[in-house]
Image: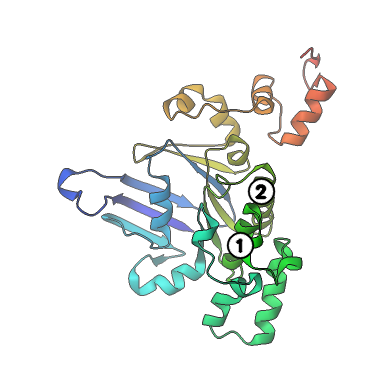
């Protein structure tokens, strides 16, 4: 479990102005669940995420990962527990060959070659890049690069994986590939924390955590968040695709895009019968 206890954060040099990015954050992320972290630009989403594995440090309060406090002396263990995927995959890729990128961290840990080769193959197959293992990363598409970044983190077998707007720079196919990888990771038991502005992505979560002006203002199930028009307007979250609007309006008991579109195409509603669209 990830636990925040009255965590506040301000960037260096802003302490005297009381210009806090995060205010008294108290929250728990339970193991095995899928969370979406949303809010308008500047609300503190990425700041909160980066506090989890010690990329930055709280001004006040404490953070624990499975009972281990996030402190410099614990960073090696913390970062084995928590993986972080950045918005731009090129900020994470350091090797000139795909398989070497995935093996990089394992080599640093002194993992025997046979075990390392097995793990690299397994994770490349998992993200569907094994047939590209000998290619240079710069020859990959945007979605493939992001999946390579995911592979290089997941090969370390973290329990918690943070995705910081991982699809915002990708085209439709790239987004679909990355989201499929995230869904597979959650199904495999990983705890997912996804930062996103995309309604189709956030509804995949078990719970949505809403940040506004550095504070957690709500925690809601996806369907309850979509129905809360005042809350969505308050955080300027208004881009809702038609299939989700349809599900909200007619109380469809699913947020799965394919299932909703199937209902729309058949023009049949569960409770009202035939619908003329």
Q: Is residue 67 left or right of residue 106?
A: left
Picture coordinates of residue 199, whole percent (x, y): 59, 35
Q: Nearer the viewer, residue 177 or 4?
A: 177
Picture coordinates of residue 6, whole percent (x, y): 31, 50
Disc 1 to disc 2, how far (Cα)? 15 Å
Helix, strand or loop under label 2? helix
Q: Nearer the viewer, residue 126 or 95?
A: 95
First reached walking from the N terminus: tag 1 or tag 2: 1
Which label belongs to residue 238? Answer: none
For the point 46% across and 57% down, the residue is: 2
Picture coordinates of residue 261, whole percent (x, y): 77, 29
Do the CB atoms of the residues marked 1 and 2 lie less than 8 Å apart? no
Helix, strand or loop under label 1? helix
Of badges 1 and 2, the one in the foreground is 1
Residue 198, above or below 128: above
Which label belongs to residue 138? Answer: 1
Circle 1 packing at 10 Å, graded few (<14), some (14-19), many (20+), is some
Q: Which residue is mark 2?
A: 174
Q: Is residue 223 left or right of residue 250?
A: left
For the point 72% across and 63% down, the residue is: 129
Q: Nearer the viewer, residue 88 or 204?
A: 88
Residue 272, above or below 56: above
Picture coordinates of residue 157, whole percent (x, y): 59, 69
Identify the colour scheme used. rainbow
């Amino acid at each position: 479990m990830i636990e925040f206890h009255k965590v506040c954060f301000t960037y260096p040099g802003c302490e005297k102005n009381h210009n806090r990015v995060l205010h008294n954050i108290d929250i728990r992320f339970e193991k095995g669940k899928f969370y979406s972290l949303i809010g308008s630009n500047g609300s503190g989403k990425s700041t909160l995420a980066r506090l989890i594995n010690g990329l930055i440090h709280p001004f006040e309060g404490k953070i624990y990962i499975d009972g281990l406090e996030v402190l410099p002396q614990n960073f090696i263990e913390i970062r084995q527990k928590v993986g972080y995927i950045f918005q731009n995959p090129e900020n994470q890729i350091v090797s000139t060959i795909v398989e070497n990128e995935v093996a990089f961290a394992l080599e640093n840990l002194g993992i025997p070659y046979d075990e390392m080769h097995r793990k690299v193959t397994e994770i490349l197959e998992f993200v569907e890049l094994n047939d590209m293992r000998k290619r240079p990363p710069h020859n990959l598409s945007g979605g493939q690069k992001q999946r390579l970044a995911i592979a290089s983190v997941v090969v370390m077998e973290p329990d918690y994986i943070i995705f910081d707007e991982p699809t915002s720079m990708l085209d439709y196919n790239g987004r679909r590939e990355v989201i499929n990888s995230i869904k597979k990771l959650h199904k495999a038991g990983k705890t997912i924390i996804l930062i996103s502005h995309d309604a189709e992505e956030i509804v995949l979560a078990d719970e949505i955590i809403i940040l506004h002006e550095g504070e957690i203002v709500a925690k809601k199930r996806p369907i309850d968040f979509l129905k809360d028009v005042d809350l969505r307007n308050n955080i300027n979250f208004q881009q809702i695709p038609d299939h989700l609007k349809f599900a909200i309006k007619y109380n469809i008991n699913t947020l799965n895009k394919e299932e909703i579109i199937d209902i729309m195409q058949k023009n049949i509603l569960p409770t009202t019968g035939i619908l003329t669209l």
